[in-house]
């Protein structure tokens, strides 16, 4: 029997994150990070924006979507 090797998970840790929607500090929870560089075919050409959303606000916002976001299960390789 060969020895099992464990790969350590790399966790990206930000110093501090705040939900842009409700202003709550995000601690020890997963959240949505959005980064967007607006391109030529927009009125925001060259503008760069980023924001974070906590899970609650994400649920609130996506609940209003006409077409719901695609969901699936993450399969770890
Ligand atoms: Zn929030």
Image: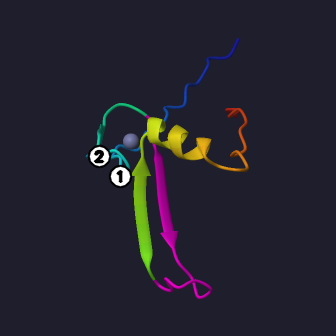
Q: Position of residue 31 (x, y in %)?
A: 45, 41
Q: Is residue 13 above or below residue 45?
A: above
Residue 31 falls within the magenta-colored stretch? yes
Q: Residues within 10 Å of mark 1 (few under 14, many from 20)?
A: some
Q: Which residue is mark 2?
A: 23
Label 2 with label 1: CB-CB less than 8 Å:
yes
Q: Residue at x 50, y 68 (%)?
A: 36
> Quick check: 63 left or right of 53?
right
Dominant SS of magenta comes to loop
Query: Residues in magenta?
Result: 30-46
Q: Is mark 1 within 8 Å of ligand 1?
A: yes
Q: Residue at x 62, y 17 (%)?
A: 3
Residue 1 falls in image quadrant: top right
Q: Which residue is mark 1?
A: 20
Residue 50 falls in image quadrant: bottom left
| Mark 2 residue element | loop
Q: Residue at x 54, y 38 (%)?
A: 59
Q: Position of residue 9 (x, y in %)?
A: 49, 34
Q: Position of residue 7 (x, y in %)?
A: 54, 31
Q: Is mark 2 within 8 Å of ligand 1?
A: yes
């Amino acid at each position: 029997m060969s020895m099992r090797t464990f790969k350590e998970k790399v966790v990206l840790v930000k110093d501090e994150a705040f939900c842009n929607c409700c202003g709550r500090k995000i601690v020890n929870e997963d959240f949505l990070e959005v980064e967007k560089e607006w391109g030529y075919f927009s009125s925001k050409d060259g503008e760069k924006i980023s924001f974070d959303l906590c899970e609650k606000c994400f649920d609130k916002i996506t609940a209003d979507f006409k077409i719901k976001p695609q969901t699936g299960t993450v399969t770890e390789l």
